[in-house]
Amino acid sequence: MQCPMLLSTNVGARYLRQYNQFLVIGSCVIQEHPKIQEKYSKNRACLHVCLETYHMNMVETKLACMVKIHKPTELVVLTVDGSPHCFQLHVIAEDLHRYFDLDTVVKHLVIEQGKVHEIDGVAVKTARHLHKVQRLLE
């Protein structure tokens, strides 16, 4: 299943034009959870990136251009759960949704112990603010 590297993919790539839904995954999903990647890649342009390697600003800028040009109906972010690096992909997706007032539906999926869990965007926004998380825990 094709899943090119996000930062090496041209923003106007023919590959992206073939789909109206995008899937952005943490690179480790390809090696660690290939069946999950395959399942969620169906009918979506799949792109991977590792935020242990690249700064989130580079990823956000590239993905912003792709989303602005192609206007996908859905942007799905799929990562492993618990990784502070992968968490940044979810933050980026929420930022893009807010910055561009997109009609694009943003979905957040995380893999924990081989199971996929859908996460509400409000949870992603809340997780950015530790004082809010602390208040919820109290």
Image (cartoon, rainbow, N blue to C red):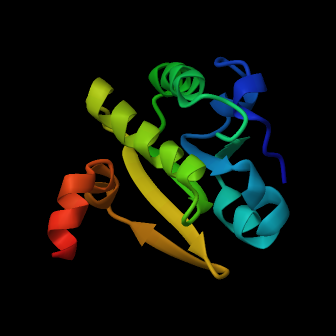
* Residue 9, picture quadrant: top right
Q: Is residue 71 left or right of residue 3?
A: left
In the rendered view, tell whether residue 33 sits above or below residue 100: below
In the rendered view, tell whether residue 43 sits above or below residue 36: above
Q: Is residue 75 left or right of residue 130?
A: right
Residue ID at (55%, 31%): 56
Q: How many marks?
A: 0
Residue ID at (18%, 70%): 136
* Residue 36, picture quadrant: bottom right
Q: Is residue 75 left or right of residue 18?
A: left
Image position, residue 78 (x, y; %):
58, 57
Using the rendered image of the protein, determine whether residue 49 is visible from the camera's viewpoint. yes
In the rendered view, tell whether residue 30 sits above or below residue 101: below
Using the rendered image of the protein, determine whether residue 44 is visible from the camera's viewpoint. no
**Where, quadrant-wise, is the N terminus in this rendering?**
bottom right
Q: Is residue 48 left or right of residue 122?
A: right
* Residue 50, picture quadrant: top right
In the rendered view, tell whether residue 30 sits above or below residue 2: below
Residue ID at (68%, 35%): 18
**Where, quadrant-wise, is the C terminus in this rendering?**
bottom left
Q: Nearer the viewer, residue 134 or 5?
A: 134
Image position, residue 49 (x, y; %):
70, 40
Image position, residue 22 (x, y; %):
57, 43
